[in-house]
Image (cartoon, rainbow, N blue to C red):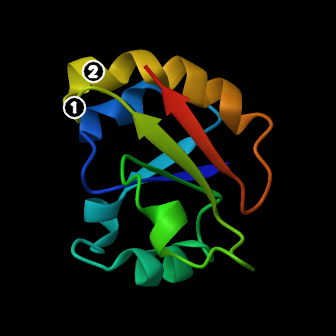
Amino acid sequence: MRVLLDENLPHKLKQLFEDDVEVVTVGYRGWEGKENGDLLRIAESEFDVLVTMDQGIPHQQNLTGIKISIVLLEAESNRYEDLAPLIFRVNTVLKTIKDGQVVPVRS
């Protein structure tokens, strides 16, 4: 499974994903500053899941026909300390998430 970490998330989170999950950051791919719609379209050819805190994506984007799944992290802030405890649940979600599905993971 290939996961794309959105640019608003700490890169350090990569180390918390399970071994069979390849995690790449938006910054590493050189996609910083891409609008959400553009990011989803280009990412879906390389990645299975986008992990983000951008709560607007499901409301602002037409996700019909999008193959990439989205995990929406909901935490107090985007600091590593607030997000790290959520990654255990994200790893569980990744085992059952379907193409194009949007799954919230809350603290």
User: Helix, strand or loop at disc 1?
Assistant: loop
Provide residue 40's location: percent of width, then percent of height: 51, 74
Q: Which residue is mark 2?
A: 82
**Residue count near mark 1 (Cα–Cα under 10 Å), binned few <14, some 14–19, many ≥20:** few
Badge 2 or badge 1: first in the primary sequence? 1
Task: Identify the amino acid type marked 2.
Answer: Asp
Give the image quarter of residue 82: top left
Could you tell whether 73 is left or right of 77 in the image?
right
Whether 81 is drawn above or below 31: the answer is: above
Task: Identify the amino acid type marked 1.
Answer: Ser
Q: Mark 2–mark 1 contact, CB under 8 Å? A: yes
- The residue lying at 57 percent from left, 30 percent from top is 90
Could you tell whether 98 is left or right of 35 in the image?
right
Query: In the drawing, what numbered circle is on residue 17?
Result: none
Residue found at the very far front of the displayed protein: 59
User: Helix, strand or loop at disc 2?
Assistant: helix
Provide residue 29's location: percent of width, then percent of height: 34, 69
Spatial separation of the CA atoms under disc 2 and disc 1: 6 Å
- The residue lying at 43 percent from left, 84 percent from top is 38
**Residue count near mark 2 (Cα–Cα under 10 Å), binned few <14, some 14–19, many ≥20:** few
Q: Is residue 51 visible?
A: yes
Provide residue 101's location: percent of width, then percent of height: 72, 55
Whether 104 is drawn above or below 35: the answer is: above
Q: Is residue 18 visible?
A: no
Whether 84 is drawn above or below 35: the answer is: above
- The residue lying at 23 percent from left, 26 percent from top is 80
Q: Which residue is mark 1?
A: 77
Give the image quarter of residue 107: top left
- The residue lying at 63 percent from left, 77 percent from top is 45
